[in-house]
Amino acid sequence: MPELPEMETYRGLLHQQICGAAITAATVQREKTINVPPAQFVQTVQGNRLTLIERRAKHLLFHLQNGHVLLLHLMLGGFLYLGTAEDKLARTAQVTLSFGERILYFHGLRLGYLHLLTPDQIDERMASLGPEPLEPGFTLDRFLELLAEKRGVLKTTLVDQHWIAGIGNCYSDEICFHAGILPTRRIPELTAGERARLYHSMQTVLTEAIRFGGYMDQPLYRGDRLTGGFDERCQVYDRGGEPCPRCGQPIEKGELSSRKVFACTNCQH
């Protein structure tokens, strides 16, 4: 599932490519992907200019000139492709938005959605999300305050979108590996040094993942050399059985609350 770095990569690239452009056409192939009747969706977005693209947690927010906002959550299996009718992928798109000859294809939205909302509805939807881990106000002190309130397992806490927004399966494991802490540790057991290390690892891993385009390997558009560049830089995620890049011992794959978890039980403690 795309996480904060993947969605931030999409946001930055789409801002460069289509922000400010007018939506010349829209199609809906799967009505369950949207939240209003298809005719209303098309009528509301068509002819409107895209004024701003924002990211909040794992969501993208496409702001339209008429004040409405398209809220995207890709969930598991969703991805975007920006191309023309000639170079489109051999995959069904649940929704498309055309910007002249260029078309933004929304693929794999069987679990995900693209909802048409008012600003008030957006505020309501986003209200329960936790703080952004890379925003300037999210300091070490703030992180320690939030952590002091938790009693559960570290990985389960890191992926809780109501606690901190944007971290999922991949980056929770990568952050824990960077910090040298097992993701299965219980939070009350963490020392002061481990808590500080966890914060700095969160900042480092997420920043680096954005810099290298996240781990999703499907390019956003033809010639896109950024998207997916972090995949080869993942240290433990999806590397079960491979040697740990730090100590050489095999990386272990386990399960925690129905989630995959990858860690080196030799050099993470």
Image (cartoon, rainbow, N blue to C red):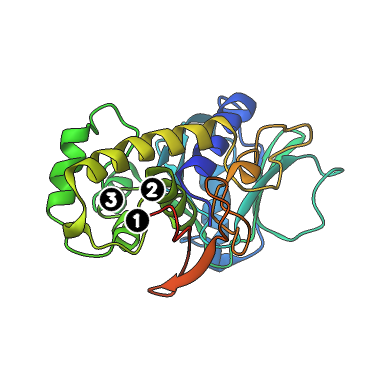
Is residue 48 shown above or below 3?
A: above
In this rendering, the label closer to the viewer, 3 or 2: 2
The reply to whether discs 3 and 1 touch (Cβ–Cβ < 8 Å) is no
Q: Earlier in the sequence, mark 3 or mark 2?
A: 3
* Position in image of residue 92 (x %, y %): 74, 61
Residue type highlighted by circle 1: His
Residue type highlighted by circle 3: Leu
Residue highlighted by disc 3: 129
Asked if one can make out residue 54 in the rendered structure from this viewpoint, the answer is no
The reply to whether discs 1 and 2 touch (Cβ–Cβ < 8 Å) is yes
Q: Residues within 10 Å of mark 3 (few under 14, many from 20)?
A: some
Q: Earlier in the sequence, mark 3 or mark 1?
A: 3
Residue highlighted by disc 1: 269
195 left or right of 31 in image: left
Residue type highlighted by circle 2: Gly
* Position in image of residue 157 (x %, y %): 28, 58
Asked if one can make out residue 131 in the rendered structure from this viewpoint, the answer is yes
The structure residue drawn at horizontal position 44% and vertical position 38%, both measured from the top left corner, is 206
The structure residue drawn at horizontal position 31% and vertical position 43%, both measured from the top left corner, is 198
